[in-house]
Image: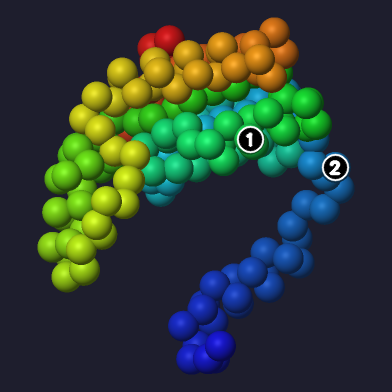
Amino acid sequence: MTDDGIFDDLLAANKRYARSAPREFDGIAHQGVMILTCMDSRIEPLEMVGLMIGEAKILRTAGARLTDRGLAAFIMGVHKLNVNRILLVPHTKCAASSLDEAGMRAAIMGASGIDPGDFEFGVSPDQLGNLRADCERLRTHPLIAGFAEVGGFLYDVETGLLSREC
């Protein structure tokens, strides 16, 4: 590991944060909420639903897609961390819904010069279809169904509003 200073600004900011960071949390989702949203930096998942640190669990993936690891996190959240409401929240103007798999592989190869082969990015232009499928996967999973309510919402990056889609 080299210490080339590339992370110094972030470590300095972390020291400032640590001086006043809240510490009295037990890791439980105190409002019973767990949100899967996109990695897009325009989204503040707690603020968009009026919650604070410690009140919800947050997952992020490209395009807010439910992965196997995400499913495992939801199951743990429901059975270990007080989660009883699950929100899946993709957003408008998402890069993950602007291309299909072949298009994303071509874009990655064009940017990097490296062929990603058959790597699956989980992207698709059918954003709402994917949202419905991911909601259905959660709603019908035996370790989620009957334990938590699942809602699918689209976040509008221009207005900040959520619309219920499923």
- Residue 17 location, quadrant: bottom right
To which residue does mark 2 refer? 26
Badge 1 density bin: few <14, some 14–19, many ≥20, Cα 10 Å: few
Compared across the picture, whether 66 is left or right of 140 comes to left
- What amino acid is labelled 1 in the image? Ala
Q: Nearer the viewer, residue 90 or 71?
A: 71
Which residue shows up at 56% across the image and 13% down it? 139
Q: Position of residue 5 (x, y in %)?
A: 50, 88
Residue 95 coordinates in the image, percent (x, y): 25, 42
Left or right: residue 75 compared with residue 109: right
Task: Left or right? Give the position of 69 relative to 77.
Answer: left
Q: Which residue is label 1 attached to?
A: 72
Vertical side of 126 occupied by 44: above or below: below
Residue sitting nearer the eye, 133 or 127? 133
Name the element at disc 1. Answer: helix
Q: Can residue 42 be seen in this view?
A: no
The residue positioned 78% from the left and 26% from the top of the image is 79
